[in-house]
Amino acid sequence: MAEAALHTAPTLAGRASDLLWRRQGLLILLLILPPALWLGIIYLGSLFALLAQSFFSIDEFSGLINYEFTLSTYAELFRPSNLDIIIRTVVMASAVTIAAAIIGFPVAYYAARYARGRWKALFYLGVMLPLWSSYLVKVYSWKLILAKEGIVSWLFETLGLTWLLEAYLSLPILGGNSLSVSWTGTFLVFLYVWIPFMILPIQAALERVPVSMLEASGDLGANPGQTFRHVLLPLALPGVVAGSIFTFSLTLGDYIIPQIVGTSARMIGQAVYQFQGTAGNIPLAAAFAVVPILIMGVYLYVARRMGAFNAL
Amino acid sequence: MKSFLKSCSAIVLATNVAALPVAAEMVTEIGAGEGQLNIVAWPGYIERGETMAEFDWVTKFEDATGCKVNVKTANTSDEMVALMNEGGFDLVTASGDASLRMVAGKRVQPINISLIPSWDTIDDRLKQAPWHYVDGKNYGVPYMWGPNVLMYNTEIFGDQPPTSWNVVFEPMNLPDGKPNEGRVQAYDGPIHIADAALYLMTHKPELGIVSPYELNQDQYNAALDLLRQQRKLVGRYWHDAFIQIDDFKNEGMAASGSWPFQVNLLQGDNAPIASVIPQEGVTGWADTTMMHVDSENPNCAYMWFEHTLSSNLMSDLSVWFGANPAVPAACTDGRGMQTAEGCTKNGMDDFEKVRFWTTPVTKCESQGECVPYYRWVSDYIGVIGGR
C-alpha cells in the first residue's frame, strides 16, 4: 500500500497550487487582474467620464451645465472659430511630423550606420540631452533665440541678410512681427522639442536593416537613390511611422509651446485648457479633447496597417 | 471590539452632522488656535521668506498663534472656485470675478467683523465693496487691489507719453514715426473684452455702456469689433507676466495693458518703461480673503484676518506684488517696507478710476440681460484666432 501513503490529504495551499497547475488560464487571470483593474478604472474610467461630459451641454443663459444627452456640443465644434482651431492644430502637427522625419532620417541613418564607439555614445547623448532639461526652460530659451532682438535676428544682421528675414516675416500666415510671434517660430520650437522622439525609432528600425541588402541592391545595379526608395525606406518605414505617432500626437495635444511662442491663436490643447479652466464649459472642453483621440485613432489604425508597431 | 468601533464611528458621524449647521453660522467668538490654517492664494500672495528672505509675513503669525499656514496656490479665479468647491480649505484670496460666484454657491460664510479689531483701519471704499458685501453681510476681508495700467516704452514715446488706450486699439503711428502694428500687446484673457468696452464708453457714448462688465448684445458686438481691429495690431497676446517682461525687453514692444507688477520689475531692471492711467480709466482687480463655509480652523482663520490687517503683511506684499493694501495706513506708517511714494506708484490714488473685475452674468443690474462670461471666453478665442 505504498501508493496510498503518498496520497496524504492535500492542504489548502496544495490544492490551490494544483488547481493553478491544472488550469493555467486561471493563473494568468489572477496575475493580470490587478493591472487590468487599474487600467480599467483609472485610465478607461477617466476616458469615459470625459466622453460622457462631452454629451452634456452648457446652458446658453445661465452658463450652468445641463446634464442631458445632446449632440449640440459636438455641433459647436463645427463653428468656424472652433473648426479653425482643429484645422490649425492638425496642419501644424502634420508639418512638424513631416519635417521631423526629413531631418531625423539622415541623423538616424548616420547614427545607425557610421557612428561607432564613443561617437555613438556622444550621439545618444546629443539626442537625449534636450529631453533631460526642463521642457519649459527649452521653450523659454527658444523664445529668446527667436525674439526680434534675439540671436537669429542678430545673425541675419551680421551677415547683412536682414532684408531676407524681413521679406520672410512679411509673408502672410508664416510671418509676423518677429520669428517668436509667428507660426514659423511655433513650428521650429515644436520641431526641436519633439525630434528626439522621431530619431530614436528610426534609428532602431535602421539598425535592423541588414547591410547586405543594401549591398545586394547596389550589386544588382541600383543607384543610391533607387536603393533608398526601394530598399532602405520601405524597410525603415515602420520606424518612421512609429516616430511620427509620437511627434504627431505630442504636437496635437501640446498647449504650452503655442502659448509662449507664436501668434496667440489657439491650438486644441489650449482650447481644452481654457474652456475647462476659465470658462467652466466642461462639455465643450471634453468634446475638444475627443478630437485628438479620434484623429489618433485613425492615425494608429493606418500606422498599424503599415507595420509600425513591429519597430517599437 | 467590533461593536465598540461601530459605536465610535457612529459618534463621530453624529458629531460631524451636528457640527455642520453650526459651522455654517457666523463665528461669534474666537477660541484657541486649531494649530493649522489652509489657504488658497494667488502665487506670490503668501510669502514666508522662501523666495526672498525679506519678504515674509507668515513666520511671525505662526510663532504668535501656533497656526501652521499651508498654502495652495491657484493660477486662475476658476481654479480657486474649483478648489473651494472641493473643500478642505479655510481661506481663499478671491478676486472680484470669483468672489460672488462663491457667495452665490454658498461656499463661503459671512464674517463677523466685530471679531476683527483692526477692521476699522480698512479703506472705507472697500469695507462694503459689492464684490464681497452681499445682502448686508460681509463675506470677506479686503486684501489687496491694483489697476491694469497702460505700460509703455519711454524711448519710443519720448516726450509724448500716451494719454489714451487708443495706442493699443487703433492703428496709428507712434511718436517715433513708426506704426504701432506689431508693437502693442493685449491681455490674453476674455476679461480683456471689458477693456475694449471701457474704451468704447468714452469713444462711442451712443452705445450707452454703463459698466464694462455688463454688455448687451450690441455693446458686446461693438467691443468685439474693436478687438478684431486690435488683433491686426497685436503680434502676441500676453498671458504670463514674465513673458510680457521679456517681450518688452527683447521684442521691441511699445505699449500694452499691464500690471504695476511688470512695470516695477522692468523699472527695477532699468528698462525704459513707464506706466500711465489713461483718460478712459482702467480696469483692475480687488481681492478679498474669504472663509470657507465648512472651515475646520475658524479660530486660526480669524486670527489670520486680523494679521492681514495689522501686521507688516499688506505693506510688504504691496512692495512685493506692486499692488495696493486694503489698509491705507500700511503705505505710510512704516509697519513694512512700503512708502507713500510706492503706493502712489502702484496706483493707490487712482481708486476712483478703476473698474474692478467682476464676472459678467446674464442677469445684470444695469440692463436686464447681458452676455455671460462663458460666451466672452469662446468669442475671445475666436477673435484671437482671427475670426
Image (spheres, rainbow, N blue to C red):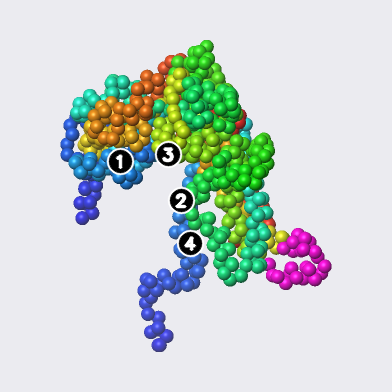
Q: In which quarter of the image is the C terminus of chain B?
A: top right
Inspect the magenta stretch and tell me whether residue A231 lies in it: yes
Which stretch did the figure color magenta? A209-232
Given this view, does label 3 or label 1 mark the residue nearer the observer?
Answer: 3
- Cα separation between marks 4 and 2: 15 Å
Given this view, does label 1 or label 2 mark the residue nearer the observer?
Answer: 1
Subunit bearing disc 2: A
Same chain for the residues under marks 4 and 3 in the image: no
- Cα separation between marks 2 and 3: 48 Å
Say whether disc 3 or disc 1 marks the residue closer to the N-terminus. Answer: 1
Q: What element carries label 2?
A: helix
Residue that appears at 56% across and 51% down: A193
Given this view, does label 4 or label 3 mark the residue nearer the observer?
Answer: 3
Subunit bearing disc 3: B
Query: Can you identify the residue that label 4 sits on?
Result: A32
Q: Which amino acid does label 2 sit on?
A: Ile
Q: Give residue B55's mark.
A: 1
Q: What element carries label 4?
A: helix
